Image (spheres, helix red, strand yellow):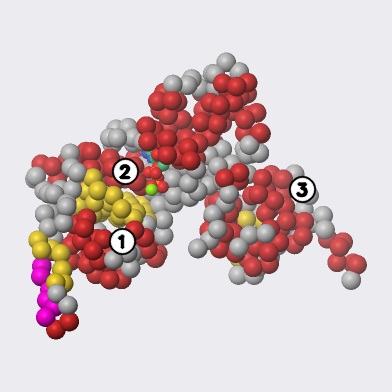
Amino acid sequence: MAKIPSEENGILHPETQLPEDDRDVSLRPKSLSEFLGQKAMKENLSVFISAAKNRSESLDHLFLIGPPGLGKTTLAQVVANELGADFKVTSAPALDKPKDLAGILTTVTEKTVFFIDEIHRLKPTIEEMLYIAMEDYELDWIIGQGPSARTIRIPIPPFTLVGATTKAGNVSSPLVSRFGISCRFSFYEPEDMEAIVRRSAGILKVTVDNDAAALLASSARGTPRVVNRLLRRMRDFAEVFGSGHITKKVVAEGLERLEIDALGLEKHDREILRIIIERYNGGPVGAETLAISVGEAVETLEDYYEPYLIQAGLIQRTPRGRVVTALAYDHLKLAKGRNENSGLLF
Ligand SMILES: Nc1ncnc2c1ncn2[C@@H]1O[C@H](COP(=O)(O)OP(=O)(O)O)[C@@H](O)[C@H]1O
Ligand SMILES: [Mg+2]
């Protein structure tokens, strides 16, 4: 497992679990109408939910794919609310033994929404059990031991499995094929991010100017979990240093204090870019070499730092290694080729 960035450089990393995220519950949308953005996905889902309700059937099994912090867990709960159904939640690592899954499946009632997070991490034996549950609404259970052992099949009421993953490529194809509906999340558009800021501000009872909301939205990597964190920090700054009202000035100063820049980069992100530029002349540099230079495990570099740097167009992965783009030079205000002469020493 890759090491997760520490709290001090983890605000912008939605995969980190910060203590304040637990207080996020009130910010979680409860209905589809409160769930902002992801328009196309939401519209389709709303049709499928209405159709299932009209037929008084359970909704098809639902597969949610997307990076952390974009709303997969939230959407699963929203679907249960919209269906007026029970909601049960677990994650693949918690399903260690067959009895862990059986324990939940034997308590589902008709139309229950059963949410399994990180579904790419299911063990093969658990996955086999899940296939039968999803397809036949039955549970294979072995009773007794040794030669007298036998399997009984226990019926389960029709339920909806919602599986979420950040790594769709790691989910086995037999499992994928058992989901009737797939929803792929994309990073939120700036106007959706602003709408999320305004909604969250309303719930947190803090006022935010429009230009302040826009600046917050653009620094939050298209990720609702991140923008909510930043909003809380800005509320703190506004309360301590000002009148409590969040202006653009409060946000600009607050982001500077947190060392977050206009592209949504933190200090360590900039350090990575700087090292590629200053030590490796902009690249290409291999991932292992780069990881040692920046003091991270190679998995941490690849899983936690690079995705956003690539998405923001600051670095590229090439067959020979990582290369920074012209945008990275501009952003760090560094001139290209500044180390060109260092080779003359040898
Ligand atoms: N569409 C949305 N509209 C408003 N807020 C959202 C939306 N999606 C997510 N959020 C906020 O972001 C937080 C993180 O979402 P979550 O469902 O936990 O993400 P994931 O499960 O994909 O990691 C939620 O607590 C919620 O406050
Ligand atoms: Mg989640």
As for residue 152 lying within the magenta part, the answer is: yes
| Of callouts 3 and 2, the N-terminal one | 2
Q: Which residue is mark 2?
A: 75
Nearest to the observer: residue 142 or residue 125: 142
Q: Is residue 38 visible?
A: yes
Give the image location of residue 185, x and y in percent.
38, 48
**Identity, as a three-letter code, of the amino acid under mark 3:** Leu
Residue 28 has which mark?
none
The residue lying at 89 percent from left, 71 percent from top is: 346
| Magenta residues (range) | 148-153
Residue 334 has which mark?
3
| Of callouts 3 and 1, the N-terminal one | 1
Residue at mark 3 to residue at mark 2: CA–CA distance: 43 Å
- Secondary element under disc 3, as helix, strand or loop, is loop
Q: Are there few (<14), some (14-19), or many (20+) residues within 10 Å of tag 2?
A: many
Residue at mark 1 to residue at mark 2: CA–CA distance: 22 Å
Per the picture, the main secondary structure of the magenta-coloured stretch is strand
Q: Would you say 156 lies left or right of 334 here?
A: left
Q: Which mark's residue is nearer the viewer, 3 or 2?
A: 2
Q: Which mark's residue is nearer the viewer, 3 or 1?
A: 1
**Identity, as a three-letter code, of the amino acid under mark 2:** Leu
